[in-house]
Amino acid sequence: MPVYVLSKSQTFHLTDNSHFSYILKIAEDPAAGKTLHQIYWGAAVSDGCLDYLCDEYQMDLASFDAFTQVPPFAYPTSGRGDYRPAAIRAVGEDGNDCTLLTYQGYEVRAGKPVPAGLPHVYTEDDAEANTLIIRMKDEKTGLAVALCYTVHEKLHTLTQSVRLENNGTHTVTLYNPASASVSLRGGYDMLHLQGAWIKERSIERIQPMHGIREISSNRGASSHQHNPFVALLRADTTEFTGDCYGMALVYSGSHRMLVEQNAFGYTRFVGGVNECTWKLEPGDAFQTPEMMLVYSDAGLNGMSQLFHTMIRTRVCRGFWRDQPRPVLVNNWEATYFDFNTDKLLGIAQKAAQIGAELLVLDDGWFGKRNSDNCSLGDWVVNEEKLPGGIGLLAEKVNELGLKFGLWFEPEMISPDSGLYRAHPDWCLHVPDRPRSERRQQLILDMSRKDVQDYVIDAVSSVLDSANIEYVKWDMNRNFTEAGSAMLPADRQGELHHRYMLGLYRVLEEITSRFPEILFESCSGGGGRFDAGMLYYMPQTWTSDDSDAVERLSIQYGTSVAYPPAAMGAHVSAVPNHQVGRVTSLAFRGHVAMSGNFGYELDLTALSSEELDEMKEQILFIKKHRRLTQQGRFTRLASPFEGYITAWQFASVDQDELLVCMFRRYAKAGAENEFIRIRDVDVNAWYEDEDGKHYHGSALKQIGLLPHFPFGDASSRIVHLRKVKN
Ligand code: GLA
């Protein structure tokens, strides 16, 4: 049983009975009554230790005063002398944000309640999970708070979300109600994924400090800048050893994660929505997004592997979750806006010839769009470019033996569009202020039901009109003037979250209407690479930077929280369009093979030798994609630390391994650097594709010597198959 309720010690012990324990305790506050505290999270402990832990904490709780700031409130509030970040500020009728949540009761259920209208970690069977719901209440305002913790036993992880309900008689205004708050003893390094457009998710590890650190987005998207993910690590935690705590939101909008270490050696984490001021009328409820809470005692890599399995198997859904993802050819970097049917069919012919499976038509097929200055919102084919429309083009592509896919940017509206001329108030805007354009476009107000319905109808009617088997769903700018013509003045602060709720409704509707279409999300590359989008679309375009050398860091950084099966990775032309670098086709192929593979270059401009090499690459991918998409991924050498990068994929039974090794630049007289392999059977022999044998113990203890080809940007992939024990 993963939820133990221990009445003697007044504790709740959440555990998968193997990897982790998370312990909550009810304490008696002499002035306030019963309060709820989170007294432990870490490696699994037995119930037997709880009395000891409670004794230790009793001291802290009894001696609580405004100066020590020690009690690890499970859902800290403001105004009562806990000066660390609060999980919520709630302002009642009297205009004050002083809130006191007292314990009211609990409930344990098999399975998991679904947070309505929001993406989440799901279960396929009630036996997969157990949920503890703890109810608390602020007597004065009538604000009822239900903390919902689910133990996903087989995933060895925990999720948390919170439901806030106004059971009082007056409005309560909520400010950034958090999804989770966590307390840890000791100081921790903080690791997060920062970046910008074309340089997403660089790993940054920061020493502990006193004071508050904030990872956040106020952009209306989870952002290129700060991924909604934070890890806390002990100073001596490494890639493979030591305590590592990961927190990641299943959400795609503005978010906020705060970490504070205080002078008494306690670390608090609080995380959830950002830019959210929500008026809760009597009888109304607010559901927070869900936070995934992952603990590993096997370092950063151990944490990543837990996130990978959870996201790949219980966040990603639907037909394509476990299907091999098709090798695609996308025309964006091949043609940009300059294409017509003949050009596309020329590329498609070559794509079929090399064994690709899907042709994706990117931006520029609709309205009058021959550059990025118009037509977003007018989802009607441009017959001048594509006579006969999308239907005919898809048919011709299908005749070549390829699937056909299409790009949309449905959340956007160009000022120069029929849609804008008909509905100038459908975009986010603030009256009497300029409407700031980015890439010459505005954002549709997805909080409006009429706008949501328009998007559902416009996208669905294109998808109904042709045999479209893949959709790239883009979103190329962030919020400015985040106001809605439909919301009253006192609810404008709800816009950021209402936008997301509206978007999620649209995504749920469209992906359920077209369950067999493979959807890939995108936001100027990786500006919305988060578990929220992955719930609707099982893969994301990782970055608009397609240079293979730069991609090493981007894909490596992304893998800290997200599985390779979620990453789109394409081979593009040289000189590369973002950085001008020239690298070999082999190297570019090796980098892209670790994600959902594609080509994004003009196949009609390549030599027959290059096309032959691509044919070989595709054969290799088809042979190994089960392993790269569903195997266990381990990082072996970091591009953030040296000039060699390596990672591997292993089958769950350790029968098969794919070791991918990359060298950014050549060095004269370089040291022989063995790459130590993980996840091998140390009692077995393995054979590579040249018939060479390696003993598992040697692979683990000594490793593989990469034998990189001569020159910069070189790489080697070694496939190992277990031959005998
Ligand atoms: C974004 C995407 C690109 C491409 C363009 C089209 O930048 O990330 O891959 O689709 O839009 O305008």
Image (tube, rainbow, N blue to C red):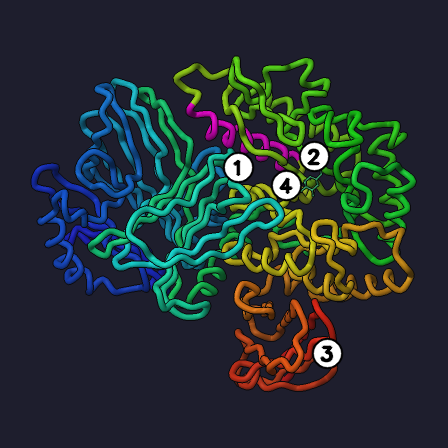
Residue at horizontal 29%, vertical 41%? 85
> Does label 4 or label 1 sit earlier along the sequence?
1
Rendering coords of residue 614 (x, y %): 82, 61
Q: Nearer the viewer, mark 1 or mark 2?
A: 1
Where residue 221 is drawn, which disc sits there?
A: 1
Give the mark count.
Answer: 4
Pointer 4 residue Cβ closer than 8 Å to ligand 1: yes
Dot 2 falls on a residue whose secondary structure is: strand
Residue at 8% across, 37% down? 31
Q: Is residue 212 left or right of residue 509?
A: left
Q: Quadrant of ligand 1?
A: top right
Identified at 39% across, 61% down, the residue is 244
Q: What kind of residue is marked 4?
A: Gly
The stretch in magenta equals 493-513
Q: Which residue is mark 3?
A: 689
Q: Earlier in the sequence, mark 2 or mark 3?
A: 2
Q: Earlier in the sequence, mark 4 or mark 3?
A: 4
| Image position, residue 487 (x, y; %) | 47, 17
**What amino acid type should be assigned to the residue bearing mark 1?**
Ala
Q: Residue beneath label 2, please?
A: 408
